Image (cartoon, rainbow, N blue to C red):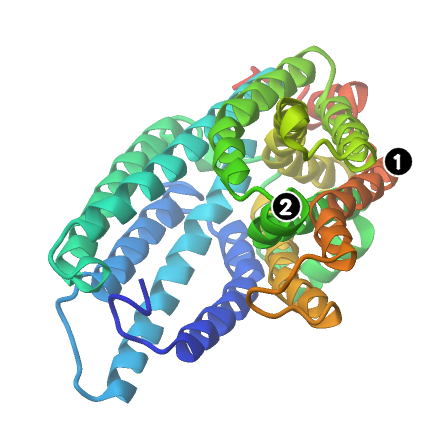
Amino acid sequence: MLTDNLLLSGLVAGLILTFARLFDGVTDPLIGMWLDNTVTRWGKFRPFLLGGSIMINIGMLFIFGGFVRFSNPTLQYAWIIVWYAVYIIGYTAQSACTKSAQVQLTSDTRQRSLLAFLTSIIDAFYWNGFLAVSVNYVAGFPGGLTNPTGYRHIVLLAIAVNILLTFFALLSLREHDRPEFYSRQRRPADRVRVGTLIDLISRNHALQALIAAAATNKLAWVLQGAAAVYFYVYTVQNLKTQATVSLLALPAMFVGNFVGMWIARRTDRKTSFLAGTWAAILLGGLVIIVRPFDVERLWLFLLLISLVNAANGITAMNIIPMIADVADYDHWKNGRFVPGLVGTTFGLVDKLVSSASGLLIGGLLTAIGYQTGMEWSPVIYWAFLLVMLGVPVAGHLISVIAMRWYPINGLLYAKIQNDLDPQRVLR
């Protein structure tokens, strides 16, 4: 959209996105501290949800609405950068609540897992549907992807969806996001500061373990997305297979999310996360060993890759509610109620790891001397096989090791909730 609709050069678009990613990471802990220090008559989270929605929608409208065009390229770049920064701040405000408001919404472990399952499903269907519809819709206008009218329609649709979902989020928090329900109200001297962030990262072993486990998985997933085309061209040697795998990925993720929820509700989220992690290790390793890429065994490859995607769905489903569990753990162990800071600290590391994926892919392409239209060779075959499957297996192994230091199992979770509020009614 930046290059086709706004006519930016690829270099400028790349620089804007890179600096925006860094700005996005810096704003995470700042928003988290602000959120944790906020107590208003309208609650803690609802002002951020509403304010974030307004900023997101204004940012999208002013960037892609096509209402303002400058003939001076410098002014056009400045316009885009300013409103993209507004969008990022709004997005951070809303996503911080996604991770932290669940602490206030419910302490019932079964409800948290159900909420994570529903969020994963809605997110997957929305984004896959949005991408499938938006590109074809915009391309149908005269001039195709260079016509601003199609983008304006898509942005107005995205704004409508954001407003609708924000309304339901505000409605769901209406009875829970109140000062009288906040745990252990802090004195003014106990305000969250930068030192709180440093102490949180250094002392909260549950957060450290979760970040290590989730960050390695996230890096592997991002690398898979970046290397997918190369993998199907040079390793599988059948680019059409990618379309079939993509078609099967959504139902596979749905099955994985459901299984992850089922295990978590009957045991705990740590067990569910490890179950998905071990399944991904074994299945990914099996694909590397068997390498069923020939036509005769294509069915086996599709089956195994679908199972790998399902296993990844199990692990992914547990991440968001585990962030809430870590916030409760820190509250219980260190006596501070900082769900916003816990969620945004996790988000900061997650974004930094995602940003590193481009460097890794670029380094790999340089190391193998890749050029457009490069001929097949054993080196390129194994390079993309290991990036697509070997790196995720290694990441999952690191997750298993990290989870040894993650203390929150079912028994400890019950103790935490009972100690924090012995007379509580599960919300």
The residue under label 1 is 404
User: Would you call the spot at circle 1 few (<14 residues within 10 Å), some (14-19), or many (20 or more)?
Assistant: few
Instruction: Please provide percent x and percent y for residue 54.
Output: 27, 53
Quadrant (top left/top right/bottom left/bottom right) for the N terminus = bottom left
Q: CA distance from mark 1 to mark 2?
A: 22 Å
In the depicted view, which residue is nearer to us: 296 or 266?
Answer: 296
Q: Is residue 230 above or below residue 77?
A: above
Quarter where residue 392 is shown:
top right
Q: Nearer the viewer, residue 19 or 304?
A: 304
Disc 1 vs disc 2: which is toward the camera? Answer: 2
**Residue 223 drawn above or below residue 253:** below
For label 2, the SS is: helix
In this rendering, the answer to whether 288 lies above or below 143 is above
Element class at badge 1? helix
Q: On residue 362, which mark appears?
A: none
Give the x, y percent position of residue 195: 70, 64
Residue that appears at 57% across and 42% down: 238
- Residue under the image location 80 percent in, 18 percent down: 411
Q: At 35% across and 74% down in the image, what residue appears?
A: 81
* Left or right of 163 on screen, residue 217: right
Residue 185: percent from left, percent from top: 58, 42
Of mark 1 and mark 2, the one earlier in the sequence is: 2
The residue sitting at 73% across, 42% down in the picture is 389
From this view, report whether residue 224 is shown above or below residue 271: below
* Residue marked by disc 2: 221
Q: Residue furthest top?
A: 266
Mark 2 belongs to which amino acid? Answer: Trp
For mark 2, does the 10 Å Cα neighbourhood hold few (<14), some (14 to 19), or many (20 or more) residues?
A: many
Query: Could you tell me the amino acid type at mark 1?
Result: Arg
Camera-side residue of 385 and 135? 385
